[in-house]
Amino acid sequence: MIPAYANFGGKIHGGILLSLMDKVAYAAASKHAGNYCVTVNVDGVNFLQPVEVGELVSLQASVNYVGRTSLLVGIRVTAEDVRSGTIKHTNTSYFTMVAKDEANKPTQVPGLLLETRDETRRFQEAIKRRQLQDEYREQFDNARTILAVEDQMNLLEDERCRIVY
Ligand SMILES: CC(C)(COP(=O)(O)OP(=O)(O)OC[C@H]1O[C@@H](n2cnc3c(N)ncnc32)[C@H](O)[C@@H]1OP(=O)(O)O)[C@@H](O)C(=O)NCCC(=O)NCCS
């Protein structure tokens, strides 16, 4: 990580890491799909520890799940202090990618061979992740449409805000 990637606090910008992750997700997805892919969704972006200038960042990716046209790529990011050899886990995120054909339409991807128990576990976890995301999206959309602002004033009671309109 070079100094040009640092923020005002001297740590590496989260955006630099996200950009690297997006590229790695693309590489893994497009290699499996045999087609161009686009990023549709990113889940689990939590930066657990800061990355310092001079650290060596590694990204490990695997295609954990495939749907019909989509692929879920899991990416584990670590940063190594090359002098001490200390390695820290900075985040693990999940990128949903969709394969596109020449007409820019979603196109079917090959199925996945599950060669180890870990690969089977990741595939199962991806199914659960997708189910929970669908449920969350539906519940949140319902909550937004059903309730009016005036009905939810109690949510603000212990919050650090003041209505001034
Ligand atoms: C995502 C996109 C391909 C969906 O197109 P669509 O015509 O609605 O296609 P579909 O409804 O058939 O969805 C295609 C797949 O994407 C999945 N998908 C769509 N929206 C999704 C979301 N928000 N999260 C996760 N998966 C999603 C669908 O489940 C489907 O997967 P499957 O075929 O494995 O079952 C389209 O909206 C798109 O191209 N978006 C822009 C992506 C892009 O340009 N990204 C770069 C960053 S700007």
Image: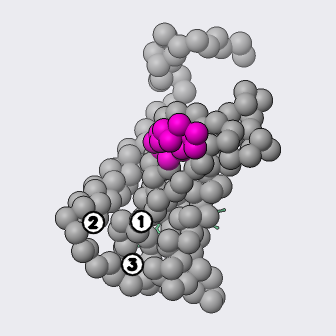
- Residue type indicated by callout 3: Arg
> Where 97 sits versus 10, above or below?
below
Residue 85 colored magenta?
Answer: yes
Given contact means CB atoms under 8 Å apart, are the residues at marks 3 and 1 in contact?
Answer: no
Report the Cα–Cα distance between label 3 and label 1.
17 Å
| Coloring scheme used | one colour
Disc 2: which residue: 119
Q: What x and y, as percent, mark residue 120?
A: 23, 66
Q: Nearer the viewer, residue 160 or 127?
A: 127
Q: Residue furthest right?
A: 4
Q: Which residue is mark 1?
A: 62
Q: Position of residue 154 (x, y in %)?
A: 46, 15
How far apart are labels 2 and 1 at the CA level? 9 Å
Residue type, label 2? Glu
Name the residue rendered at 77%, 41% in the picture.
Answer: 3
The numbered disc on residue 68 is 3
Secondary structure found at label 1:
strand
Residue at 36%, 65% in the rendered image: 64
Check if residue 160 falls in the magenta segment: no
CB of mark 2 within 8 Å of CB of mark 1?
A: yes
How many C-alpha atoms fall within 10 Å of the one at disc 3: few (<14), some, or many (≥20)? few
Q: Is mark 3 within 8 Å of ligand 1?
A: yes
Query: Vertically, is 104 above or below 82?
Result: below
Q: Quadrant of the C terminus?
A: top right
Q: Nearer the viewer, residue 37 or 58?
A: 58
The image quadrant that residue 35 belongs to is: bottom right
> Could you tell which of marks 3 and 2 lies nearer the N-terminus?
3
Whether ligand 1 has any atom under 8 Å from the Cβ at mark 2 is answered as no
Q: Looking at the image, is mark 2 or mark 1 earlier in the sequence?
A: 1
Q: Residue at x 63, y 88 (%)?
A: 103
